[in-house]
Amino acid sequence: MLISPDSSAPYRDAASMRGLLQRIEAAVTRPWNIMEVCGGQTFTLTRYRLEELLPSEVKMLHGPGCPVCVTPAEVIDTAISIASRKEVILCSFGDMLRVPGTDGSLLRAKAAGADVRLLYSPVDAIKIARENPGREVVFLAIGFETTMPSYAVMVEKAAEAGIGNLSLLTSLYTVPAAVRAIKKDPDSRVDALLAAGHVCAVTGTAPYKALAAQLNMPVVVTGFEPADMLLGILRAVEMLERGESACVNAYRRVVKEEGNRVAQEAVSRVFSQAPAHWRGIGTIEGSGMVLRPGYEHFDARRRWKDVKPAVCLAESSPCIAGRIMRGLANPSDCVSFGCGCTPDNPLGAPMVSAEGVCAAHYRYR
């Protein structure tokens, strides 16, 4: 049975997945490379060993969709430098504490005495700022379109409450700009894209319809369960075999064409587009989001002007994270994978988060 995008059938049902795999095998006639662009999708592919079940003609490439993985070393260095000040409480999500900078991590800074705190929601930083009026609270704000609305709400609530001791150190990215840069690389092997369903739940499908048209490439909005992934791959293979370039929503039970207008409006009020540096990839025009001029007093980089300026650093050797996230290599191609670089001792960011491609491959493959 082929699971429809709107079905309530179980999305891990073995018989359903066998049916999807059979349809993929029947549809494919030549080699194709399909990139999933979300760390959650990479995790599903690896945990359920889906890549090994696919026909040999279908190869999966793992894109730069894990925010922990693409946050550059210079942002971590800046965060560590700010956190080292006695008057600062630095907050972020748990995975960020272990991401390596040029020399060390926030976890190491915490062990050395810095007040670094793990939060589950950016809005919680407002409470900490209120409880500590004599200190500066800095939130390391990382992520893609899914987390931007929560940061926008945090900033607007802090502005309304007149909280002056709270700021954001931003490292925010938009997915379509990165996909365009990867696809236009002369070495690119990407034939089709699986777009992240939770991102599209916020943005809607319009950015990906434009992306499919600009790049002359199939794009499939895909969920995160095993059957969701196989359905997305099937739709991509079908379009590739027919020579079609379009955006198909294969996750309609969650993603609406218009997206979440409330979230979109909140983001547009607080943030604007800017160039951004991606770890292992480089600077991509229009791929980042920064605070608008009306909210510049919440910008940690402006507040801490004496912190050493960030520079675009190359990924530490021998890490090949950049090549992996551009779809040019696999984790197993790295000489340090599984020996010098492990989740307990990550040399590169993709080995830190559970959704990082290297960490997922290490755990499940």
Image (cartoon, rainbow, N blue to C red):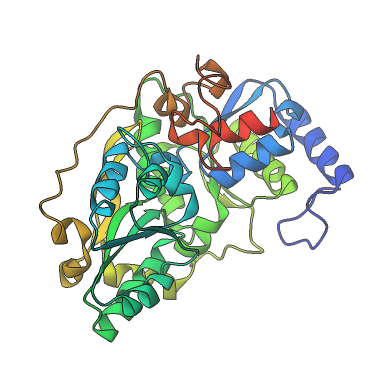
> Is residue 212 visible to the viewer in this orientation of the structure?
no
Relative vertical location of residue 351 with respect to residue 75 in this rendering, above or below: above
Snapshot quadrant of residue 162: bottom left
Q: Nearer the viewer, residue 10 or 331?
A: 331
Q: Nearer the viewer, residue 163 or 88?
A: 88
Relative vertical location of residue 257 with respect to residue 130 in this rendering, above or below: above
Q: Residue furthest left?
A: 306
Snapshot quadrant of residue 304: bottom left
Snapshot quadrant of residue 98: top left
In-image side of 357 versus 298 (left or right): right
Q: Nearer the viewer, residue 136 or 72?
A: 136
Relative vertical location of residue 163 with respect to residue 302 in this rendering, above or below: below
Q: How many marks?
A: 0
Can you say which quadrant of the picture contains the C terminus?
A: top right
Q: Nearer the viewer, residue 259 or 160?
A: 160
In-image side of 89 versus 354 (left or right): left
Q: Residue furthest top?
A: 335
Q: Position of residue 89 (x, y in %)?
A: 32, 62
> Is residue 188 visible to the viewer in this orientation of the structure?
yes
Q: Residue furthest right?
A: 15
Q: Position of residue 238 (x, y in %)?
A: 66, 37
Q: Position of residue 228 (x, y in %)?
A: 70, 49
Q: Residue at x 67, y 37 (%)?
A: 45
